């Protein structure tokens, strides 16, 4: 379980995050949503140690990541998998070599074991047959699936995803969402996803945190979001005409 307590983050005197308190639920898809510039990316960077909070705690199963030594933080990161917005694959490495990369760096497996583990991960994301291709030879959706395979190669307890559907068409985005959700439940991973995609929120969001101007604006489940009385949240989620129509339909069904 990941707990954030009284977290503040400032840059040169400008406060970006203000008193954030949130528990990210084990074995669930935890989504962080908010407008661009709201602070959600800064929050995720504080969670994984790319930034250090001005004050507050980030607790992994009761262990304060902020107060860990550099060596302890490195060890802690071995329990984390990360999926970046751009997939961040190595162009000069094959698909198989990309997935093997964290195994080469951190595991004690021999070469054959690392290759087999990488192939198992590729099979889990339905990419058997693509292992000898290079990133430039596969589609954006396939690149994201390679990134997911690489992220789960070390059997992480925590999975962090920064805008995993960025640049993808709606059908491919749905595939990525379903894959992240199924992997989360299959391996009991605590998954945290930064996203703007309301389809993701409604489709796989089990624990949702809305960040508004650096504050915790709302927290709840996707089943509760349509009935929220938090105006900044409703303004955010019903920005499109389609979602406004959905809300009207839900409200009409309750009359």
Image: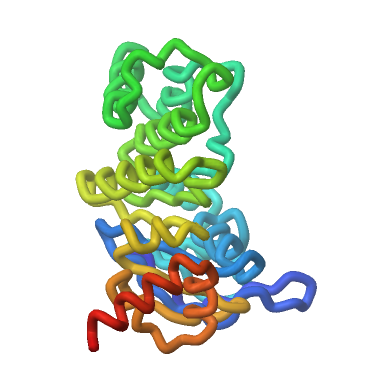
Q: Position of residue 40 (x, y in %)?
A: 56, 65
Q: Quadrant of residue 11?
A: bottom right
Q: Quadrant of the C terminus?
A: bottom left
Is residue 249 rendered to the left or right of residue 70? left
User: As rendered, which of 254 and 232 lies closer to the eye?
Assistant: 254
Residue positioned 45% across, 77% down in the render: 5
**Residue 33 or 67: which is nearer the viewer?**
33
Indicate whether 59 appears above or below 29: below
Does residue 157 appear to the left or right of 54 in the view shown?
A: left
Visible residue check, residue 216? no
Q: Does the image show residue 160? A: yes
Quick check: 41 above or below 233?
Answer: above
- Residue 99 in the image, given as x and y percentages of width and height: 43, 25
Q: Residue at x 54, y 71 (%)?
A: 239
Residue 253 percent location from the top left of the image? 24, 80
Name of the residue lying farthest toward the right: 12
Residue drawn at (53%, 78%), measured in percent from left and top?
A: 235
Q: Which residue shows up at 52% across the image and 67% down it?
A: 240
Residue 38 in the image: state x and y as whole percent: 61, 71
Quadrant showing the N terminus? bottom left
Numbered label tally? 0
Taking 10 as reference, is 190 above or below it?
Answer: above
**Residue toward you, 132 or 17:** 132
Question: What scheme was used to colour the molecule?
Answer: rainbow
Which picture quadrant has residue 104? top left
């Amino acid at each position: 379980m990941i707990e954030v307590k009284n977290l503040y983050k400032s840059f040169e005197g400008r406060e970006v995050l203000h008193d954030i308190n949130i528990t990210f639920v084990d074995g669930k898809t935890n989504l962080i949503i908010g407008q661009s510039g709201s602070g959600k990316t800064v929050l995720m960077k504080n969670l994984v140690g790319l930034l250090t909070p001005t004050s507050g705690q980030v607790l992994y199963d009761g262990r304060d990541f902020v107060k860990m030594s550099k060596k302890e933080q490195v060890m802690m990161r071995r329990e984390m998998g990360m999926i970046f917005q751009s997939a961040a694959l190595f162009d000069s490495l094959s698909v198989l070599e990309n997935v093997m990369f964290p195994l080469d760096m951190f595991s004690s497996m021999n070469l054959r074991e690392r290759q087999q583990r990488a192939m198992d991960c590729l099979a889990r994301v339905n990419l058997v047959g693509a292992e000898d291709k290079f990133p430039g030879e596969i589609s954006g959706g396939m690149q994201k699936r390679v990134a997911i395979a690489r992220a789960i190669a070390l059997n992480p307890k925590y999975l962090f995803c920064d805008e995993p559907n960025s640049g993808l068409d709606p059908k491919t985005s749905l595939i990525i969402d379903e894959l992240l959700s199924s992997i989360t439940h299959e391996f009991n991973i605590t998954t945290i996803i930064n996203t703007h995609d309301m389809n993701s929120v409604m489709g796989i969001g089990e624990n949702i945190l809305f960040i508004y101007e650096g504050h915790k604006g709302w927290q709840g489940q996707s089943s509760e979001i349509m009935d929220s009385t938090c105006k900044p949240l409703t303004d955010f989620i019903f920005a499109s005409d389609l979602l406004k129509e959905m809300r009207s339909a839900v409200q009409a069904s309750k009359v």
